[in-house]
Amino acid sequence: MKKIRNILENKGHQVYCVTPETSVYDALLVMMEKNISSLLIMENEVLKGIFTERDYARKLILQGKSSKDTPIGEIMTANLYTIALNESIDHCMEMMSIHKIRHLPVIDNNRVTGMVSIGDVVRFIIEDQKRTIQQLESYIAS
């Protein structure tokens, strides 16, 4: 059974984060520069929350707050879901589906070791299925 670790082996373990005191505006600049749609909020290597484009729309813009004056810690999602490095990809898809989330921080030994998105999962599954089809075709042809 394929694991989250397999996704990170292909994708890499890069994680982008800011502190709770970072302004929403500065966090959005990081997201734009890195072409990402979520950021982890960390303090002294401790995961405090996650900030997504959805948080921006629902908790800042629709509340009439200023992105330059609001610390991200005020609007981040603090009760977030995480997934372990050795969890199955099937379990990851189930969590994302049930909780209607698109990003999961990956935890190993109580430390953030990566991030997976629904896009990462879909890409991995498609590539894995292509490899399986090629192997079957090769087996049939021989």
Image (cartoon, grey):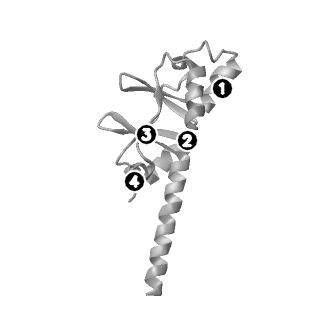
Q: Left or right of 113: which side holds 136? A: right
Dot 1 amino acid type: Arg
Task: Give the amino acid at mark 4.
Answer: Asn
Q: How far apart are marks 3 and 4 (CA)?
A: 14 Å
Where residue 58 is drawn, which disc sits there? 1
Is 115 left, or right, of 31 in this rendering? left
Task: From the viewer's side, name the closer residue of 70 and 13.
Answer: 13
Of pointers 3 and 2, the one earlier in the residue sequence:
3
Residue at left 40%, top 57%?
2
Q: Distance between the residues labelled 2 and 4?
A: 18 Å
CA separation in Å, label 3 and label 2: 17 Å
**Which residue is located at x 50 percent, y 66 percent?**
129
- Residues under labels 1 and 2: Cα distance? 16 Å
Task: Tell me if label 3 and label 2 are in contact, CB under 8 Å.
Answer: no
- Disc number at residue 6? 4
**Foreground: disc 1 or disc 4:** 4
- Crowdedness near tag 4: few (<14), some (14–19) or many (≥20) residues, C-alpha within 10 Å: some
Of badges 3 and 2, nearer the viewer stands 3
Q: Residue 14 carries which label?
A: 3
Q: What element carries label 4?
A: helix
Q: Is residue 13 left or right of residue 34?
A: left
Q: Nearer the viewer, residue 52 or 82?
A: 52
- On the image, the x and y values in percent for residue 64 come to 70, 16
Q: What residue type is labelled 3?
A: Gln
User: Rounded to the nearest whole Å, what is the CA distance between mark 1 and mark 4?
Assistant: 33 Å
- For marks 3 and 1, the one nearer the N-term is 3
Residue at mark 2: 102
Name the residue at 62% across, 15% down: 68
Q: Give the mark nearest the N terminus, 1 or 4.
A: 4
Q: Which amino acid does label 2 sit on?
A: Arg
* Residue with the most extreme top position: 69
User: Which is nearer the N-term, disc 2 or disc 4?
Assistant: 4
